[in-house]
Amino acid sequence: MTDLQPGADPRSCFGSVADAYDRGRPSYPTQAAAWLVGEQPATVLELGAGTGKLTEVLVGLGHEVHATDPDAAMLERLRARLPLVRASVAGAEEIPLGDGSVDVVVAGQAFHWFDMERALPEINRVLRPGGHLALVWNQRDERVPWVRRLGALLGDQDQRTDLADPVEASGLFGWVEEETFKHRQVIDRESVLDLALSRSNIATLDEHRREAKLAEVRAFYDDYGRGMDGMQLPYLARCYRARMVEQERAPRPTSATTGTGTPEAVAEPAPEVHDSPMLVTTGSIPRIDVEVAKATPSSVLDDDTAMLLIDFR
């Protein structure tokens, strides 16, 4: 449930908290980005790129990225971080690219904001034959008791498992593959407040209620935290990808409509959780790669799920 002011549009709030978003949100595991887009260099359109958390990982993998976001303030941070990346203020509902111009369209933490009836035909339109749509959400691992308590304070808008369902239902894409990658974000007494403030349901509160909510989060950290040592917040990067279904190309309509095809019924494989090793994605890009992790003593990089289920205090 959210706690928005009457009439507030959560999609318009992120620019006002762009600094907190950039400091407080986790990055994405390199393995997840490679699964989403592929190992070979590709031409990628990123929708809802925000401050460039996912963009930076994709560029690091050698992909050519055109980053877009409807909020100019968010893109300002992205341009400061990645000045060589092409960036445009644009939404998913009207993409400023030609037909069949990119190999992959990707969205991190953004797809659930789109107007699906307009955005999905646009995404299909700009993909090259054989191209695909890739989506990812960082979701807190709320199997862990203290993380579940933190989640009760932060809100659960993007914790659902049905966020990618509109893709297959549209008839514009084939069956949706799914993978999950574990990683962690180190948070401390300050960054946990940035994480809270970057949530739309908190950012859109009036000043009095917002400060009261941040005080609750601060009290939670003081109760469960480790002071200067911080806490490792576990995430599941839930990844989805689906190939485009080629449509008969026609002049671009002034108002897009959804496709009328029915997706072919294909049995989906059970999602695989990648957890060896668990990566720490504090900041804007993963700091521990696979080779380093292999050489790290297990006492330092512990991926025992049972241990995660124990409260910090």
Image: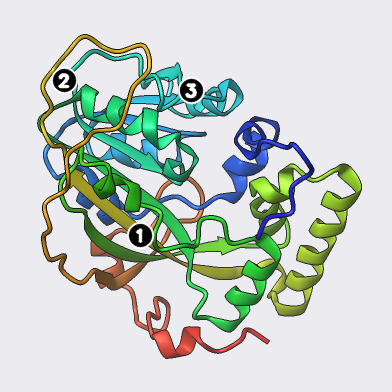
Image side of residue 87 versus residue 199, left or right: left
Real-space Cα separation, disc 3 to disc 2, in angstroms: 26 Å
Q: Quadrant of residue 302?
A: bottom left
Q: For the residue carrying disc 3, how many other residues have a C-alpha within 10 Å: few (<14), some (14-19), or many (20+)?
A: some
Residue tagged 2? 100
Q: Residue at x 64, y 53 (%)?
A: 195
Would residue 190 be seen by someone viewing this image from the given angle? yes
Q: Residue at x 58, y 61 (%)?
A: 156
Circle 1: residue type: Arg
Image side of residue 12 versus residue 54, left or right: right
Residue tagged 1? 238
Marks 3 and 2 close (CB-CB < 8 Å): no
Q: Quadrant of residue 73?
A: top right
Q: Residue at x 33, y 73 (%)?
A: 296
Real-space Cα separation, disc 1 to disc 3, in angstroms: 26 Å
Circle 2: residue type: Gly
As helix, strand or loop, the secondary structure at mark 3 comes to helix
Q: Is residue 67 above or below residue 214?
A: above
- What label does residue 79 carry, if any? 3
The answer to which of marks 1 and 3 sits earlier in the sequence is 3
